[in-house]
Image (cartoon, rainbow, N blue to C red):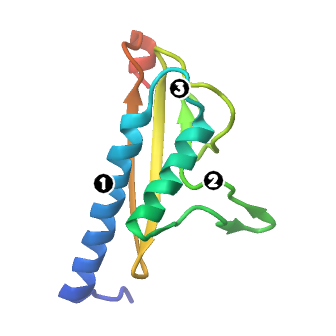
Amino acid sequence: MIPIKNAKEIEKMRQACRTASDILDRVSDLVRPGITTKEVDEAAADFMNEAGVKSAFLGYRLGHRVFPGNICISLNDEVVHGIGSQRRIQYGEIVKLDIGIIQDGWVGDNATTVPVGIVDESTDQL
């Protein structure tokens, strides 16, 4: 049976999603040529700390594997749920950002794709 949420629970869910959306907007604004995906991930962690929330992804376990990133970040045709690294973002790429937070016991999860400058037609199709 699916548990039905009450109005108070639904409002807490909305607030977690709003907070995640606000953080995603701030992170998206950082995406530019030359920044590393790790720097973007670390900035997201700072924004989460400022908001008083925790990453829903950091430390997530699946069997013996543990997710090491605060957010998921992938470039171009990479599959989603990438991990920040020393790779520098280049002009003409697309950056996929997925942010999940835990706020008051509720998860807010938002994602977007950010073009870095003008992208070519094949990249735009991704």
Q: Which mark is residue 75?
A: none
Farthest residue in the top direction?
120
Callout 1–callout 3 Cβ contact below 8 Å: no
Amino acid type assigned to the residue bearing label 2 in the image: Gly
**Distance Cα–Cα, label 1 vs label 3:** 24 Å
- Residue 69 is marked as 2
* Secondary-structure class at tag 2: loop
Q: From the top left corner, tell me how far across and down residue 92 is, in percent.
A: 46, 14
Task: Tell me residue 29's x, y (percent).
Answer: 36, 36
Sequence-wise, the earlier of marks 1 and 3 is: 1
Q: Is mark 1 on a helix, strand or loop?
A: helix
- Vertical placement of 24 versus 107: above or below? above
Look at mark 1 in the image and give the residue it sits on: 22
Residue 95 falls left or right of residue 9 = right
Using the image as rendered, state which of residue 32 and residue 77 is in the foreground: 32
Kind of residue at disc 3: Asn
The foreground one among 20 and 4 is 20
User: Which residue lies under the disc numbered 3?
Assistant: 76
Whether residue 104 appears in this view of the structure is yes
Quarter of the N terminus within the rendering: bottom left
State the quadrant of the C terminus: top left
